[in-house]
Image (cartoon, rainbow, N blue to C red):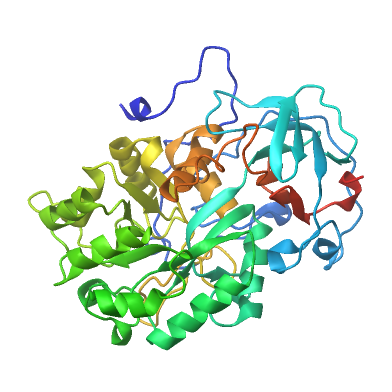
C-alpha cells in the first residue's frame, strides 16, 4: 500500500494534512484546453491544479493576530539585513517567540520558542529567555528553510553573468521561503559560463550554496529546452578549463552516461567533490544503473528530458527508481501528473525525493514553453511545491518538508548543518501561515525578509 512508504505518526499525534478528493480526476493542461485555471475567489492564489481536485489544507490554527499595517514595496530592505543581496548586518541573538515548530525528523508539530545565537539554533523550549531581539511568531508556523537544488531564476531575475538579475532571483525565492539555492546554468559558450560562475561566486550571498551545470555534457537526443548548439562531448580537459578556479563552488554537474567519455568525466566530477547527476540523457537502464554504481547520486527532474520508462527497457527512469539515488521532482502539475508523483513516492520512499522548482523568470502557475510547446522550466516556488506535494500524495506537512529541506541537504552533504530544527544547526528558518504565505525568512540567524516589521522588537 502507498502508506507503507510514509512515516506513521504515533497514536494521538497531530500534524496538518491536506486531504485529497478521490472522486474528482486530475486534468492535464491539454485536457483543460491549455487555458490557465480560473482565478480563485477572494483574491486567493491561482493554482496549476484543476478546480475541485483538492480540498483546502487543514491546519492546527493559532489565535488570530490583528492585521499588520499595509506594507510598502521597500519593506524588505529595512528590517534587519539584506545580506542575501551582498550586505551584512550581524544579529548576535534572536528569540522567535511562540511559533508552531515543524521539523521533518519530528513526529508532529509543537508549540515552542526558538533561540538563535551567532547564526545557529541555540535552544528550543516552551519558555526560553533572551536579552536580544524578539520576533513574535505566536500565530505562525516555523520550519527549516527550503533548499532548491535546481533553480535558473524567478520573478524578474535570471542566474548568470548579470549580478543585478541574479540578486532579483535570490530575493524572489527568499520571499517564498527558500534559504538555500543551487543556481543552475544552461549550456552556453564556455567563456560565458565561466563569467556566470564568477558573478555568482562573487555575490557573497549566504543563500547561494553553489552552482549546477545543466550541460554541456548531455545528450542532443534529450535536449528538452536546452540549446543544442552549445552541447559538448564529455571531456576531462574541457571540464577542467570550465570549472578552474570555481572547483568549490560547482556543486552539481549533469551528464549523459551513454556518451563516449562520460565515465572518466564522472570520476573527475567526483574527484572535484561535486555531484554527478544524470539528466538530459537517452541512457538505457543498464548504462544508467552502471553510472549510479560508479558514483552518480542524483537524477535531474525525473521523467523529463530522459528516455521514457518501458516495461522491457526501463531506461534511466527505471534505474532511478530501482537504486538508492536521489531524484528531483517538479510538482507544478505540468511536468509530472499527480499519479506519477505518487508512483515515485511508492518506489523511492520519502528519504530519496527532492522537490525542486527548475524555475525560470516569470510568475504564475503556467510553466515556460518553447514556441513548439516544449516545457522550458516552471514558475514554481518551493512553498507551492511543498503544498502541491502534500496535495498530490496526501502526506503530512513534516513528511513533505523532508523533500524540501533534509533530503536536499543530504544530497549536498550539509545535513549536519541544515535541513532540521536542532541546537547547533544553522538558523536557516522560515515563518508561514496556514495559507502558505511566507511571513519571514531567516538565513544564518539574520532576518532577510519579514512581511510585518511590527513582529520584530
Occupied quadrant, residue 107: top right
Residue 250 visible here: yes
Quadrant assignment for the C terminus:
top right
| Image side of residue 4 versus residue 457, left or right | left
In the rendered image, the vertical position of residue 180 relative to residue 159, given as above or below? above
For the point 16% across and 71% down, the residue is 259
Q: Tell me if residue 196 comes above or below residue 155 in the rendering.
A: below
What percent of the width, then of the height, locates residue 412?
Answer: 45, 51
Between 366 and 262, the one nearer to me in the picture: 262
Q: Residue at x 66, y 58 (%)?
A: 174
* x and y, in percent, of residue 150 in the image: 46, 61
When the figure is inspected, residue 67 is found, relative to residue 220, above or below; the finding is: above
Left or right: 310 with respect to 193?
A: left
**Residue in the foreground of this view, choosing between 310 and 174:** 174
Q: Quadrant of the N terminus?
A: top left
- Residue 315 is situated, as x and y percent measured from the top left of the image, at 16, 56
Amino acid at each position: 500500500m502507498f502508506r507503507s512508504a510514509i512515516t506513521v505518526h504515533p497514536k494521538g499525534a497531530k500534524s496538518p494534512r491536506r486531504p485529497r478528493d478521490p472522486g474528482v480526476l486530475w486534468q492535464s493542461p491539454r485536457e483543460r484546453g491549455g487555458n490557465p485555471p480560473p482565478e480563485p475567489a477572494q483574491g486567493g492564489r491561482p493554482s496549476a491544479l484543476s478546480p475541485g481536485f483538492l480540498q483546502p489544507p487543514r491546519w492546527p490554527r493559532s489565535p488570530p493576530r490583528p492585521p499588520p499595517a499595509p506594507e510598502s514595496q521597500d519593506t524588505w530592505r529595512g528590517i534587519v539585513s539584506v545580506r542575501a543581496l551582498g550586505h551584512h548586518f550581524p544579529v548576535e541573538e534572536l528569540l522567535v517567540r511562540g511559533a508552531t515548530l515543524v521539523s521533518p525528523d519530528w513526529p508532529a508539530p509543537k508549540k515552542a520558542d526558538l533561540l538563535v545565537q551567532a547564526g545557529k539554533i541555540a535552544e528550543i523550549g516552551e519558555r526560553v529567555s533572551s536579552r536580544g531581539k524578539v520576533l513574535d511568531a505566536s500565530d505562525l508556523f516555523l520550519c527549516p528553510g527550503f533548499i532548491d537544488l535546481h533553480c535558473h531564476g524567478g520573478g524578474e531575475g535570471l542566474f548568470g553573468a548579470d549580478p543585478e538579475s541574479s540578486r532579483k532571483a535570490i530575493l524572489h525565492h527568499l520571499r517564498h521561503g527558500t534559504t538555500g539555492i543551487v543556481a543552475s546554468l544552461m549550456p552556453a559558450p564556455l567563456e560565458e559560463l565561466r563569467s556566470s560562475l564568477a558573478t555568482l561566486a562573487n555575490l557573497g550571498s549566504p543563500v547561494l550554496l553553489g552552482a549546477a551545470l545543466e550541460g554541456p555534457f548531455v545528450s542532443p537526443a534529450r535536449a528538452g529546452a536546452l540549446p543544442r548548439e552549445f552541447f559538448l562531448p564529455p571531456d576531462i580537459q574541457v571540464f577542467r578549463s570550465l570549472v578552474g578556479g570555481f572547483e568549490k563552488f560547482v556543486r552539481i554537474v549533469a551528464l549523459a552516461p551513454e556518451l563516449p567519455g562520460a565515465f572518466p568525466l564522472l570520476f573527475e566530477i567526483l574527484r572535484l567533490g561535486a555531484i554527478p547527476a544524470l539528466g538530459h540523457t537517452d541512457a538505457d537502464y543498464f548504462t544508467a544503473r552502471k553510472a549510479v554504481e560508479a558514483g552518480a547520486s542524483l537524477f535531474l527532474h525525473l521523467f523529463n528530458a530522459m528516455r521514457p520508462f518501458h516495461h522491457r527497457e526501463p531506461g534511466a527512469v527505471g534505474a532511478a527508481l530501482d537504486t538508492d539515488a536521489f531524484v528531483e521532482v517538479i510538482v507544478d502539475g505540468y511536468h509530472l501528473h499527480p499519479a506519477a508523483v505518487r508512483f515515485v513516492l511508492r518506489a523511492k520512499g520519502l528519504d530519496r525525493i527532492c522537490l525542486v522548482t527548475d524555475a525560470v523568470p516569470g510568475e504564475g502557475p503556467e510553466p515556460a514553453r518553447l514556441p513548439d510547446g516544449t516545457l522550458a522550466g516552471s514558475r514554481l516556488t518551493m512553498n507551492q511545491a511543498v503544498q502541491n506535494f502534500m496535495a498530490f500524495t496526501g502526506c503530512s506537512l513534516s513528511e513533505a518538508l523532508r523533500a524540501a529541506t533534509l533530503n536536499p541537504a543530504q544530497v549536498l552533504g550539509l545535513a549536519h548543518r541544515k535541513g532540521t530544527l536542532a541546537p547547533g544547526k544553522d538558523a536557516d528558518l522560515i515563518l508561514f501561515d496556514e495559507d502558505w504565505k511566507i511571513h519571514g525568512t531567516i538565513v544564518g540567524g539574520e532576518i532577510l525578509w519579514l512581511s510585518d516589521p511590527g513582529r520584530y522588537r
